[in-house]
Amino acid sequence: MSGATAIVNAGNVPETPLRRAWRRLKARKAAMFGLVVIIALVLIAIFAPLIAPHDPIKQSWTAVRKAPSALYWFGTDEVGRDLFSRIIYGTRASLAAGVISVGIAVALGVPLGLLAGYGPRWVDAILSRVTDAMLASPFLILAIALAAFLGPSLTNAMIAIGITATPIFIRLTRGQVLAVKVEDYVESARAVGNPRWRIAVKHILPNVMPQLLVQITLTIATAVIAEASLSFLGLGQQPPSPSWGSMLNSAQRFLTNAPWMAIWPGLAIFITVLSFNLLGDGLRDAFDPRERG
Amino acid sequence: MLLLIARRLMQLIPTVIIVSMMIFGLQQLLPGDPATIMAGEERDPEVIEQIRKQYRLDQPIPVQYVYWIKGVVTGDLGESMRLKEPVSTLVAQKLPVTLQLATMAMIIAIFIGVPAGIVSAVKKGTVWDYVVNVISLWGISTPNFWLGILLIFLFSVHLGWLPASGYVSPFVDPWQSLKTTIMPAFVLGNSIAGVLMRHTRAAMLQALSSDYVRTARAKGLNENRVILAHAMRNALTPVITLGALEFGTLLSGAVLTEQIFTIPGFGKLIVDAVFNRDYAVVQGVVLVTSATYILLNLLADLGYILVNPRLRP
């Protein structure tokens, strides 16, 4: 996917790989749906105070477990807090957890992957063993164990998820580096005397980007579920701050007389995760050189 | 083949050692004095001192690790602070429950995922393909714990058909056992079914466009036979090995599912341990899960080679 492989489209105007990917992505309705929902979620998170009709943490003993109505669109919870406002504010915790934890994983994983793929062999040997070892523990169990030892808080949950997701990015980057480092343009960059780090950053990294972008999108989906899971268990966002996972936890106790408490947070997690999965799938197809169009 | 197994086992040694170091290292993340934290509510200095001695916390970290790993190798995973029982006993009690759940989930996932994936590939581009894709996305994107809560609402609270929580061993009452485990098994199987659908579809599409399928069709074989006897047999190999790997994922999923359905398995053990600050149990559970996962990986690897002669050395 280098600049050299830019193809020529019907109008004989050169089309860069990025433009081609965007054109293909736009043609995929499911992916575009995902993208639009994600943009909407980001806007909701940013403008939460303007959108939410009520204070998300204000309790009201006169409005305990009220069914959805014109005043409380999604109903209220066991201490009379407005569920709609809590869902709106909960977007912040979920998106922050998704983006920050994957940010940690990328910030750690990509440089280490470049180092493993393009550095000395002994570094590769050590990093690959550590990656194997981390991937040998199921994702959520490792995240729970880390969050348990670090202590329960949203920040620690994000750190735990980020560290747990790091080996995915080490392995992906390393694999891509090994694939492109034998390409002619990398060989020639080395032949003209470029230092290793420069080749890694200037020539190899851009070629890893498409795969990385796909993986980032899909891992955000996993991270959102992981944060919700940790918060559900009480290891993430702490009360009274709203989080979709912890809202589901309290909803479980009131299934008989307030089932609406369980519907909305779950639906919010589902829609968010689905959107990132749809966008990730679309990006994968859009960047796939084997796909036509 | 024996040589191959031996070689694979040798390759696993560094991974296993690093995993054990990581799990042991978790203890170092505890903020403050580990002995005081491990003592929990107990503020008696004598108790704290005893914990410090028992876990050799007064010794250098590498020495602590050597003692710990010596114990692990001989099956001693430490003692639960709260339950005053050896961690290995607790693990042995809870693991079968989770394994039962995971096996049922896997059966459900295979029964839904594989046929749906085949249909989707054979009917590519039709409404069937579309429906399967939607179901698979639903499976992958639905949080286990939400689905669990919705099922409890429908089948326990609303219809009253199934118990919302609890567990009965199949050796005590098979029918009751099925009733208590079918919902959590479905919840667990749902997400794996989505993954299996996608992989079966991809593998089938590849098989259907291969030369041997074209040859089989050219010979004038019945289309059903081409799909079932030729394409499916080859396509299912990677899917089966993937299934073995997904078994590890089931252990992760069991954590929340067991919590929701109050099933006294492995997942509930780790969650309860986390809240009771029973760190030896947390470490023990992660260790056993990782070991199981590594073993499943090895079996999947060997199984793949066994059915795929081209990969043999």
Image (spheres, coloured by chain):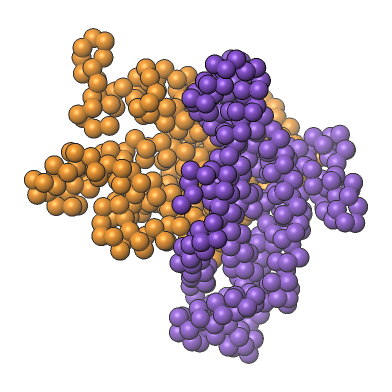
- Left or right side of B52 for A209: left
Q: Relative to residue B172, is residue B32 depicted above or below?
A: below
Where does the image place residue B222, in percent across and percent down from the top left? 65, 17
Instruction: Tell me which residue sits at (59%, 54%) in the image.
Output: B299
Quadrant of the snapshot with the N terminus of chain B: bottom right
Q: Relative to residue A275, is residue B226 depicted above or below?
A: above
Instruction: Tell me which residue sits at (45%, 80%) in the image.
Output: B62
Q: Nearer the viewer, residue A282 or B110?
A: B110
Q: Is residue B79 visible to the viewer in this orientation of the structure?
A: yes
Farthest left residue in view: A192
Give the drawing colour for chain B: purple
Q: Quadrant of residue B135?
A: top right
Where does the image place residue A148, in percent across and percent down from the top left? 57, 63
Which chain comes out orange in the rendered image?
Answer: A
- Left or right side of A178 for B47: right
Q: Relative to residue B78, is residue B99 depicted above or below?
A: above
Q: Is residue B137 visible to the viewer in this orientation of the structure?
A: no
Q: Nearer the viewer, residue A45 or B173?
A: B173
Where does the image place residue A95, in percent across and percent down from the top left? 48, 41
Q: Relative to residue B213, is residue A228 depicted above or below?
A: below
